Image (tube, rainbow, N blue to C red):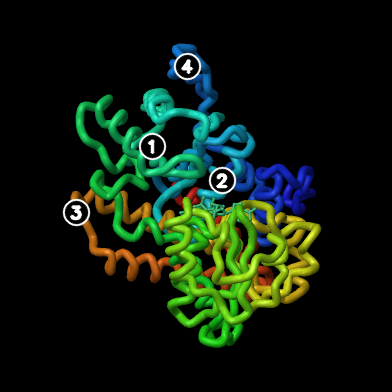
Amino acid sequence: MSYIEPAPIKDKENPLDSMMSRFDEAARLLGISDEIYNILKTPTKQVIVGLPITMDSGKIEVFQGYRVIHSNILGPSKGGIRYDPGVTLNEVQALAAWMTWKCAVVDIPYGGAKGGITCNPREMSAGELERLTRAYTLSMLDVFGPDRDIPAPDMGTGPREMAWLMDEYSKSLGMTVNSVVTGKPLVLGGSLGRVEATGRGVMVCALAGMEKLRINPYKATCAVQGFGNVGSHAARLLHERGVNILAISDMSGAYYNEKGIDIDAAAAYVEQNNRSLEGFTGAEKIPAGDLLTLKVDILVPAAKEDVITEENMHKIEARMIVEGANGPTAAVADAILNNKGILAVPDILANAGGVSVSYFEWVQNRLGYKWTQERIHRRSDRIMREAFEKVYNTSVEYQIPMRIAAYIVAIDKVAKTYTFRGGY
Ligand code: NAD
């Protein structure tokens, strides 16, 4: 059975290795068979395309595009499309598998996928990006589909690109198919509540965690790294529920106020200041890395991957970490955080509020109907709370950290579904 020993982390910078080391540990604890293990670790489909695009200069440039469907055992696969110069097949494979586990943890009927194009969207015009998105969509015509594979935004893409994708797909089929993609602008069938969905799920997990640790939200303190979509909504929603946010940060630096930051004032400032906290006077500026090691009850890393690492893991003082970002904790830090008794609510659970509301967008599109914001909040809060309880109870049952418990919940569901459906 040597194949399910926890995999040594060959390359700390390699997202696939980092994901596989946790997957292997959960698979070993669950005792899944060799056959199922091999099925779950192998992507179902991987498509690599070359996309020749005429740039504004008149020159033709060829971009590399990817779509990896990790699994479609639970239903059509779901996952974002990333535009970034650093996109590689390895990264897309890891992110696709993450989506499988994330959808399974929150019990929505989706498999996992991810796409990407190696490009620098910041250096491209809107016209170039539109041609690239349409060419990518055409090349994926037999991959995408409301019952097959449903893309969404990720780094470097947003509602604008999703609108182009939906339009190109619809034109090619000769009918409007808005359920082929989520994260669309509201007028094209986007969902109410999507913008704050991920931050809201982080808030639900933080409150659930506080309950377990018997922390009164009105006496709790919190630091939030990243003040973008996830971080700013998580901070605002926690603040509204009585939590004192002592520190926030973004690319411009970290800002600390021992009495607590006025989050509405910070959000209003960022709105008027080109989405940056630079110059915010409601708090004092501290060295960026210090935010992560503050003595607070709750730490919400909501900026980027690999910020809790070998270098700072010993200095983390929070009682609870709620991972708004994807992969903020390097796999090497897991054991140390656990030994320090820190409750780490893992990314595949904590930031799944976004994909849950994406699922509602798809459901509404298929119904040809629009739900109210109140209904969306109520349903997504319930999904997040139930998933939290399931993962927490699994961690108690197996005496393991919530991260591995989340993988166990997910792998167990996918493996059982596979066993019922059967192979060849
Ligand atoms: P965003 O671009 O809206 O915000 C990112 C924020 O992090 C910005 O304020 C940026 O200035 C800040 N930041 C970047 N590098 C930083 C650093 N080194 N130190 C401090 N701050 C830094 O992105 P987002 O949508 O909020 O996504 C944040 C994370 O959450 C990513 O890991 C993303 O994959 C993950 N996530 C997002 C969603 C979603 O629905 N948006 C869903 C699931 C996971």
Q: Is residue 172 above or below residue 224?
A: above
For the residues labelled 3 and 4, say whether their Cβ atoms are less than 8 Å apart.
no
Q: Is residue 281 above or below residue 64?
A: below
Residue at image mark 3: 369
Q: Earlier in the sequence, mark 1 or mark 3?
A: 1
> What is the secondary structure assignment of the residue under circle 3?
loop
- Measured in 3D between alpha carbons, the distance from the residue under mark 4 to the one under mark 1, in whole angstroms, is 18 Å
Q: Position of residue 341 (x, y in %)?
A: 72, 76
Q: Is residue 13 left or right of residue 283?
A: right
- Measured in 3D between alpha carbons, the distance from the residue under mark 4 to the one under mark 2, in whole angstroms, is 28 Å
Q: Position of residue 190 (x, y in %)?
A: 29, 49
- Measured in 3D between alpha carbons, the distance from the residue under mark 1 to the one under mark 3, in whole angstroms, is 23 Å
Q: Earlier in the sequence, mark 1 or mark 2?
A: 2
Tell me which residue sits at (43%, 77%) in the image. Answer: 240
Q: Is residue 32 left or right of residue 235?
A: right
- Measured in 3D between alpha carbons, the distance from the residue under mark 3 to the one under mark 4, in whole angstroms, is 38 Å
For label 4, being within 8 Å of ligand 1 is answered: no
Q: Earlier in the sequence, mark 4 or mark 2?
A: 4
Question: For the residue marked with disc 3, what is the amino acid?
Answer: Tyr
For the residues labelled 3 and 2, say whether their Cβ atoms are less than 8 Å apart.
no
Residue at image mark 1: 161
Residue at image mark 2: 97
Question: For the residue marked with disc 2, what is the amino acid?
Answer: Ala
Foreground mark, 1 or 2? 1
> What is the secondary structure assignment of the residue under circle 4?
strand
Q: Earlier in the sequence, mark 3 or mark 4?
A: 4
Tell me which residue sits at (49%, 59%) in the image. Answer: 230
Tell me which residue sits at (77%, 48%) in the image. Answer: 9
Residue 179 appears in the figure: yes
Question: For the residue marked with disc 4, what is the amino acid?
Answer: Pro
Q: Which mark is residue 52?
A: 4
Tell me which residue sits at (20%, 31%) in the image. Answer: 175
